[in-house]
Amino acid sequence: MSSLTRCNHCQLEGMLQRAEERGIEVVVEQVVEPDEPLRGWIAARYSDRKVPSAWFKQLTTHCVC
């Protein structure tokens, strides 16, 4: 990972902050459908949207930037 790239934890925190400013929530869910090509990935979307705004392979509980 580049030193200029934010870690997944920090990207999700940024999404949560922007969602709070807009008065909505961030929905985080793991893809479990067996025929889905992104099975095992974690999708994060704003509650007012149907399409995920971010995809994560792994999320940590703390910053790893």
Image (tube, rainbow, N blue to C red):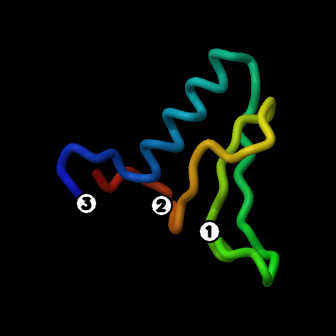
In screen coordinates, is 53 left or right of 59?
Answer: right
Q: Position of residue 42 (x, y in %)?
A: 63, 62
In screen coordinates, is 6 left or right of 26?
Answer: left
Element type at mark 3: loop
Element type at mark 1: loop
Q: Is residue 16 above or below residue 45?
A: above
Q: Residue at x 51, y 67 (%)?
A: 58
Residue pointed to by mark 1? 41
Q: Position of residue 1 (x, y in %)?
A: 25, 60
Residue pointed to by mark 2? 60
Residue pointed to by mark 3? 1
In screen coordinates, is 38 left or right of 6?
Answer: right
Q: Earlier in the sequence, mark 3 or mark 2?
A: 3
Label ID, residue 27:
none
Q: Which quadrant of the figure has residue 31?
A: bottom right
In screen coordinates, is 6 left or right of 3?
Answer: right
Q: Are marks 3 and 2 in contact (CB under 8 Å)?
A: no
| Neighbourhood count class around disc 1 (C-alpha, 10 Å): few under 14, some 14–19, many 20 upward | some
Q: How many marks?
A: 3
Q: Residue at x 80, y 41 (%)?
A: 50
Element type at mark 2: loop
The one nearer the camera, 49 or 15, is 49
- Between the C-alphas of marks 3 and 1, the distance is 18 Å
Q: Position of residue 63 (x, y in %)?
A: 37, 50
| Neighbourhood count class around disc 2 (C-alpha, 10 Å): few under 14, some 14–19, many 20 upward | few
Q: Earlier in the sequence, mark 1 or mark 2?
A: 1
Q: Are marks 1 and 2 in contact (CB under 8 Å)?
A: no
Q: Amino acid at mark 2?
A: Thr
Q: Is residue 33 above or below residue 20?
A: below
Q: Amino acid at mark 3?
A: Met
Residue located farthest toward the bottom when viewing the structure as drawn? 34
